[in-house]
Image (spheres, helix red, strand yellow):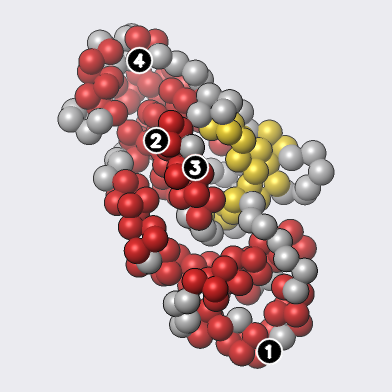
Amino acid sequence: MHVISKEPFEEAAKRYPNDSLAIRALYRLVRETDFSSPAEMRTLIPSLDNFKYRNKWWVLDVGGNNLRVIAYINFVNKRFYGEQRMITDTAKAIEATKQLVAAVPFLGGSSSESDYREAMELVDYLIENDDENPLIDFLASKIADYEDNSPRFAEFNKAIAEMPVGVALLRTLIDQHKLSYSDLKDEIGSKSLVSQILSGQRSLTITHIKALSARFGVKPEWFL
């Protein structure tokens, strides 16, 4: 799916270091997997639930119920957007859509932190009030470029790049189902082998993937 911004994940990973691996794994997994429906997403993230008061918004647990992620998820357009703070003056930018660069400097290539923050706040407003507005996609592209190259996100980007998607999926399964390493004895083997796979010292085999897919009802290709 297209995760519009890394910031909610990056901020949460900093704020809750004990859950940072689960947070990064969830980001990697959502980014690499095109879930077609809530039911399909729940096969991997059983904590997924509707957010009662906001249409198209969902909540899911991270870190064994330590944290709750509130996110807009569009399963048709494959968009995932973690909640951001909303400000009142963003309506001004929406009314100026014919002069986008003047109204939203970030669209014109600005790399300042303040323009980035304004762009994020505008996306938050659009997702909540006009989620089919094409301005979302323009902003999303600029936000992705900024976050891929900003020193602020360097540590998070490095950690995500170094985490294979199969490891992200496995770590998320462990987190969502509240498993210990020994709970995967039948699918993978010893606790030490599970630890080695999660740390990148060993890789999941085809046999592991088939066994995990059968147990959790997930597609084998999601591990690859």
- Labels 4, 3: front one: 3
Q: Is residue 27 visible?
A: no
Q: CA distance from mark 1 to mark 2?
A: 42 Å
Q: Earlier in the sequence, mark 1 or mark 2?
A: 2
Residue name at image x 42 percent, y 63 percent: 147
Could you tell me residue 48's position as x and y percent? Answer: 63, 33
Give amino acid for label 3: Arg
In the figure, is residue 3 to the left or right of 171?
right
Q: Amino acid at mark 1?
A: Lys
Local secondary structure at mark 1: helix
On the image, the x and y values in percent for residue 118 come to 61, 72
Give the residue displayed 73% in from the left and 66% down from the top.
Answer: 87
Residue 117 drawn above or below residue 38: below
Q: Residue furthest left?
A: 201
User: Label 2, on which residue?
Assistant: 21
The quarter of the picture where residue 164 lies is top left
Q: Which residue is mark 4?
A: 181
Determine which residue is flagged by label 3: 15
Query: To which quarter of the image does residue 52 belong?
Result: top right
The image quadrant where one finds the C terminus is top left
Amino acid type of the residue tagged 4 in the rendering: Tyr
The residue under label 1 is 98
Q: At numbered mark 4, what does the secondary structure look like: helix, strand or loop?
A: helix
